Amino acid sequence: MTTKRACVIGWPAKHSRSPKLHGYWIEKYGLDGDYRIEEVTTDDFPAFIMNLAGHGYVGCNITMPHKDAAFQLSVPDDRAKGVGASNTLYFDNGVLRSTNTDVEGAMGALDQASPGWDKHTKSAVIMGAGGACRAVIYGLIERGIETIHVANRTYEKAVDMQTRFGDRVKPAHWDDLPKLLAGAKLLINTTSLGMKGQPPLEVDISGLAPDAVVCDIIYVPLPTPLLADAKARGFKTANGLDMLLHQAVSGFELWFGKRPEVTRELFDLLAADIAKA
Ligand code: NAP
């Protein structure tokens, strides 16, 4: 039997934690597999992807800045089409298909933080309107959330979210946040604010509903200041590392034929690595 190989393609990508994550599962399940990093420039990306099998890969993850190009160069499923970007590629009878597993990553993190959250949540507030926001909105709509407020520094990009996803999405200015957060039951940060090396995220969450869930998709540092604040106030918290772990599950299954489990041991392994960053 030949070794099945997968990779993460990005530029830069050398800090990706995906090899550690997939390597853990390959070892745990005793599979003849391999997962590595491929740093590929934007110029070289199309040729690399069109010869993915020639490079020896059964599939790959895609990270910045190639998710939109990966979408164009593969046959996307409904999720990837909805989000307009692909982060997981795989072969199906020789056809290069793609999906967007950030959707299940974000929803998996919320499910883990607060099982059944979607049964009693009618509206959500999202901060940010970039690529990750699109995956979060897609997931929230799939789960039946009726109203999704999107507040962004650049208001026009919040409007773009409404154009893409329809009237359930309510675009908002950043200054609208205090009003939107009063009594809110679900708050999700999809900006890069609060990430190591980025400006802080300054938001007052004291007015959220007492049973609110706060999610931050950033995972360096862990916890982010937003989640530390939320936890100290007694809110449930969903973190970006759980999103990363849950988004990896389907890709691993598609490439290696085994659906892996997200466990505390795996979380701790990656968290220890992040703590060194
Ligand atoms: P992106 O497309 O570049 O979007 C960045 C967002 O952050 C935009 O809404 C941008 O607002 C906002 N922003 C950046 N700097 C800001 C500032 N100084 N003030 C106010 N808003 C600011 O990035 P992305 O792909 O959506 O990723 C966003 C974050 O999510 C990154 O930190 C990424 O690492 C993380 N992420 C995590 C996972 C995971 O698995 N946990 C998956 C994907 C992404 P403007 O529109 O005004 O520029």
Image (cartoon, rainbow, N blue to C red):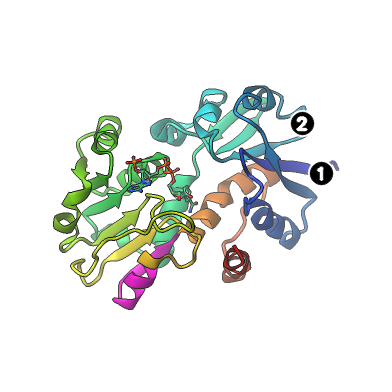
Residue at the spot of label 2:
55
Name the front one of labels 1 and 2: 2
**Label 1 secondary element:** loop
Asked whether residue 38 appears in the rendered view, the answer is yes
Q: Seen in the image, is 29 located left or right of residue 8?
A: right
Q: Is residue 20 magenta?
A: no
Residue at the spot of label 1:
3
**Label 2 secondary element:** loop
Question: What is the residue that sits farthest to the right in this orientation?
Answer: 1
Q: Is residue 231 magenta?
A: yes
Q: Amino acid at mark 1?
A: Thr
Q: Which mark is residue 151?
A: none
Asked whether residue 114 appears in the rendered view, the answer is no
Q: Seen in the image, is 24 located left or right of residue 108?
A: right
Name the residue: 63% across, 31% down. 41
Magenta range is 227-239
Query: Is the C terminus in the top left, top right, bottom left or bottom right quadrant?
Result: bottom right
Name the residue: 21% across, 70% down. 206
